[in-house]
Image (spheres, helix red, strand yellow):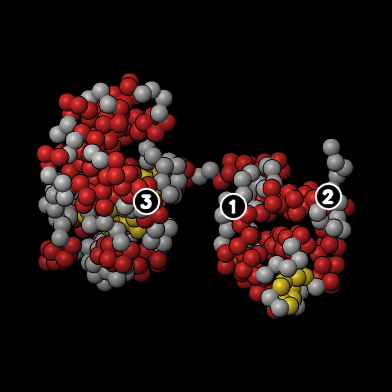
């Protein structure tokens, strides 16, 4: 393989242009594809989610690859996302023998063990109490929202056939049976444990509701917000049927995944994460196991510990370099850092977590940040401030809310301008003298109530 081609492949890989890698390699005769080139080909196919094709290519050079850690990583990756856990584990363990201590490989090894154990437990449970002999009398939540958005009339044979034809997939028999008991709705238990982290949580995914078989309700398979809508409008991959929506309002879904079984087979259940490039995370080998594995959200309720962690953060975590420098240059108050920590402690006590919204104390923190920033940057414009805002607390390391809603900040700024507290002179923003005096007075009052330092 020429250095020029190798450089191109690496550049495309760095830019996530995996389709270009595949296209370039496929233009070459197979006789010109050496071991290294096949490795690049397999990696690109893996990154495009074409795991079966990737596996086929990588197995074609198995004899050379057995003692190559990178080859074992790639083939393990293919097996993992084809839900062939034992083969994936074998490949990852071989990588670990060849190159011990890789953190990513360790995570996949742990995930394989976890999935295999969960699957074994779930299968034993399903065997102990067959799916259709289970008590589903308390499975569904009774609510006006569920009735309005999800629950359809019991599906007729004609409706089932029509929806299957529309979607292009045969629905699982156990799913059809459950929908014949109640056709869609919001389950009481809405969380499913995961072996790997997702955009929702480190150890589970959550659903809002389950789509029924019909077209009348918005959240039904054929509804206005159903499976085809999520694939056509939101870009979810054509790997099967969108089964459940999630609390992220469209940014992740639960799907029936037919890639391994074909359109008429028994699909696995997976989580698809739009926020991570439509990343697919295996949940259960079939619908019945997925339903049996749902648990109540209280199992994952970490609010008490989260509050304690955030209280510790606002009391002790280091300020960002920007916020620290602004505090050091603040005029009119000696202990501004202690005042900020005191206010943020009250925010956490009130909310249970550290975040700025539209409440009174959050508004005070918006005021403080602008006062500090404008004091050190007297020529600040609206665009400059909104761009710099996140560096003070929102996305800082240490003392940080871990994110923010830009609309809250811009709405606060608009309101202060409307009230006359902030003036815009030739594009330059500043607090009025009266507004500054009021704010500093509030801060001095808070400061006077603080205990002695040290």
Q: Quadrant of the C terminus?
A: top right
How many angstroms separate mark 3 from mark 1 (CA)? 25 Å
Q: Residue at x 68, y 42 (%)?
A: 317
Mark 2: secondary structure = loop
Q: Earlier in the sequence, mark 3 or mark 2?
A: 3
Q: Is residue 177 visible?
A: no
Mark 3: secondary structure = loop
- The percent position of residue 161, horizontal first and vertical second, equals 12, 63
How many angstroms separate mark 1 from mark 2 (CA)? 23 Å
Depth check: give the residue in front, 280 or 289: 280
Disc marking residue 146 = none
Q: Nearer the viewer, mark 3 or mark 2?
A: 3
- The percent position of residue 78, horizontal first and vertical second, equals 24, 38
Check disc 3 and report the residue beneath it: 15
Kindly give the residue lying farthest to the top in the view shown.
Answer: 97
Around disc 3, counting alpha carbons within 10 Å, would you say few (fewer than 14), some (14 to 19), or many (20 or more)?
few
Q: Residue at x 37, y 37 (%)?
A: 195
Please tell me in which quadrant of the rendered image residue 380 appears: bottom right
- The percent position of residue 225, horizontal first and vertical second, equals 31, 67
Q: Quadrant of the N terminus?
A: top left
Horizontal side, residue 349 vs residue 286: left or right: right
Disc marking residue 335 = 2
Horizontal side, residue 410 vs residue 63: left or right: right
Check disc 1 and report the residue beneath it: 395
Q: Residue at x 29, y 71 (%)?
A: 224
Depth check: give the residue in front, 181 or 119: 119
How many angstroms separate mark 3 from mark 2 (CA)? 47 Å
């Amino acid at each position: 393989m020429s250095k020029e081609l190798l450089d191109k492949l690496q550049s495309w890989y760095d830019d996530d242009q995996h389709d270009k890698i595949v296209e370039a390699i496929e233009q070459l005769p197979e006789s010109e594809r050496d071991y290294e080139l096949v490795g690049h080909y397999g990696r690109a196919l893996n990154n495009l989610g074409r795991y079966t094709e990737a596996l086929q290519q990588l197995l074609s050079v198995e004899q050379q690859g057995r003692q190559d850690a990178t080859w074992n990583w790639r083939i393990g990756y293919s097996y993992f996302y084809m839900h062939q856990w034992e083969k994936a584990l074998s490949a990852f363990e071989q990588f670990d023998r060849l190159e011990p201590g890789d953190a990513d490989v360790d995570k996949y090894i742990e995930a394989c063990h976890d999935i295999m154990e969960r699957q074994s437990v779930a299968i034993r449970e399903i065997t102990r109490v067959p799916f259709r002999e289970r008590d589903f009398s308390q499975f569904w939540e009774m609510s006006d929202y569920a009735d309005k958005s999800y629950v359809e009339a019991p599906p007729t044979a004609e409706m089932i056939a029509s929806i299957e034809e529309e979607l292009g997939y045969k629905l699982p028999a156990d799913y059809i049976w459950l929908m014949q008991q109640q056709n869609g709705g919001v389950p009481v238990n809405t969380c499913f444990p995961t072996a790997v982290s997702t955009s929702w949580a480190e150890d589970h995914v959550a659903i809002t509701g389950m789509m029924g078989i019909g077209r009348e309700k918005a959240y039904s398979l054929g509804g206005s917000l159903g499976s085809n809508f999520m694939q056509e409008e939101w870009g979810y991959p054509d790997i099967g049927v969108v089964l459940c929506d999630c609390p992220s309002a469209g940014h992740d879904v639960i799907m029936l995944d037919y890639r391994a079984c074909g359109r008429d087979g028994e699909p696995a259940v997976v989580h698809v994460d739009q926020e991570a490039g439509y990343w697919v995370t295996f949940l259960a080998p079939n619908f019945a196991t997925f339903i049996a594995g749902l648990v109540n959200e209280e199992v994952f309720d970490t609010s008490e510990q989260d509050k304690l962690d955030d209280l510790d953060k606002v009391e002790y975590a280091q300020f960002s370099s920007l916020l620290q420098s602004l505090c050091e240059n603040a005029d009119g108050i000696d202990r501004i850092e202690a005042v900020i920590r005191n206010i943020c402690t009250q925010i956490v006590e009130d909310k249970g977590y550290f975040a700025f919204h539209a409440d009174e104390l959050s508004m005070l923190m918006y005021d403080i940040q602008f006062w500090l920033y404008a004091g050190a940057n007297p020529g600040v414009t609206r665009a400059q401030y909104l761009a710099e805002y996140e560096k003070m607390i929102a996305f800082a390391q240490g003392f940080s809310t871990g994110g923010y809603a830009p609309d809250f900040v811009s709405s606060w700024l608009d309101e202060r301008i409307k009230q006359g507290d902030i003036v815009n002179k030739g594009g330059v923003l500043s607090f009025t003298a009266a507004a500054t005096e009021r704010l500093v007075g509030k801060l001095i009052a808070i400061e006077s109530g603080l205990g002695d330092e040290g």
